[in-house]
Image (spheres, rainbow, N blue to C red):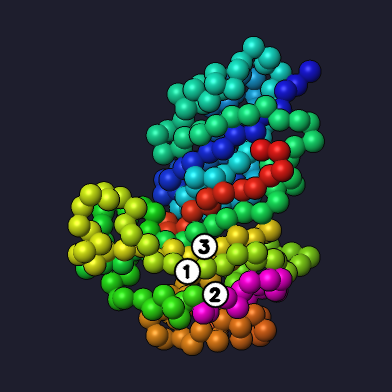
């Protein structure tokens, strides 16, 4: 008899090739480790059996998470959820931390049971990049027009064909139609050192938040790159709607670097 568990995991993506395990390269082309394989290795050591981990979805190389969810099965019935959490964190690198572990029913599936997901892209604003946030934000020196960025992102709410925002090297899909439930751009105080005078010195974070039932490869980063052009005054907010209608990849702004993107939450009915 096997037991199924689900867990939430946070990671800083800069030192990994992404979520999904990759085929190994030769000595001439070393491959960075995948988060999935490191989790599987840690769990295999904790349970003393070979474990396969299934995630809610893939995150690309360099993308961060505080809300990735995955599940696995084990025949080891002696371990508690606390044992599993502490054991995994013992064998994982410090850039990956398991936040919680829960026993779930057999019909739970980290990917198929997901109802919606939230991603946020973070731009750092200020006279210079704050080093404490360099791994999770993209510093932009020019002051961005948040109102225009908000106007532009409002065109994305609802069901649309997001083909234009899909990565050029993405595998062919049956459909590139996706539903965006929430979309907003906000300017927020620096999330670190609240007792400092960073905001008085002109530092802030611009957050691009998207909640949807599904996302295409590099879709959020393509949207963030386009919004950056709008915020800089180089694109009109209305052009976001034009991109959706024309489905033309060449109209999309430069794909934003992965470090500014974080998977923040995955919703389930029972987890």
Answer left or right for 213 relative to 186.
right
Answer left or right for 93 relative to 53.
left
Residue 74, given in percent of the width and then of the height, sits at 69, 22
Tag of residue 185: 1
Q: Residue at x 64, y 80 (%)?
A: 244
Answer left or right for 231 relative to 88.
left
Tell which circle, 1 or 2, labels the residue nearer the N-terminal end: 2
Q: Which residue is mark 3?
A: 209
Q: Residue at x 56, y 81 (%)?
A: 240
- How many other residues sit within 10 Å of disc 2, few (<14), some (14-19) or many (≥20)? many
The reply to whether residue 149 is visible in this rendering is yes
Q: Are marks 1 and 2 in contact (CB under 8 Å)?
A: yes
Q: Residue at x 28, y 72 (%)?
A: 141
Q: Which residue is mark 2?
A: 153
Answer left or right for 122 relative to 59.
left
The question of residue 22 being in magenta is answered with no
- How many other residues sit within 10 Å of disc 1, few (<14), some (14-19) or many (≥20)? many
> Cα distance, mark 1 to mark 2?
7 Å
The reply to whether residue 32 is visible in this rendering is no
Query: In the rendered image of this protein, does residue 269 appear above or below residue 167?
Result: above
Residue 87, given in percent of the width and then of the height, sits at 51, 21
Q: Image quadrant of residue 136? A: bottom left
Task: Tell me where the magenta segment starts and ends, as one range.
Answer: 151-164
Query: In the rendered image of this protein, does residue 8 appear above or below residue 145?
Result: above
């Amino acid at each position: 008899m096997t037991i199924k568990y689900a867990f939430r995991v946070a990671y800083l993506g800069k030192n990994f090739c992404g979520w999904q395990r990759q085929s190994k390269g030769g000595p001439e082309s070393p491959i960075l480790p995948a988060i999935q394989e490191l989790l599987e290795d840690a769990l295999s050591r904790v349970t003393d059996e070979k474990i396969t981990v299934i995630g809610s979805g893939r995150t690309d190389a360099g993308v961060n998470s505080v809300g990735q969810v995955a599940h696995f099965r084990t025949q080891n019935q002696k371990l508690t959820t606390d044992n599993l959490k502490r054991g995994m964190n013992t064998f994982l690198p410090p850039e990956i931390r398991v936040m919680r572990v829960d026993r779930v029913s057999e019909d739970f599936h980290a990917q198929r049971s997901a109802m919606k997901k939230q991603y946020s892209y973070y731009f750092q604003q200020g006279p210079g990049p704050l080093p404490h946030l360099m791994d999770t934000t993209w510093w932009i020196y020019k002051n961005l027009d948040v109102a225009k960025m908000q106007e532009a992102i409002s065109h994305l709410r609802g069901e649309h064909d997001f083909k234009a925002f899909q990565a050029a090297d993405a595998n062919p899909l049956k459909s590139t139609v996706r539903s965006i439930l929430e979309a907003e751009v906000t300017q927020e105080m620096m999330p670190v050192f609240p007792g400092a005078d960073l905001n008085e010195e002109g530092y802030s974070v611009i957050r691009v938040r998207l909640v949807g039932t599904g996302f295409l490869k590099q879709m959020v980063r393509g949207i963030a790159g386009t919004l950056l052009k709008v915020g800089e005054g180089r694109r009109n907010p209305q052009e976001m709607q034009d991109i959706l209608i024309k489905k033309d990849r060449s109209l999309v702004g430069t794909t934003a670097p992965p470090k500014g993107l974080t998977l923040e939450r995955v919703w389930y009915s029972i987890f």
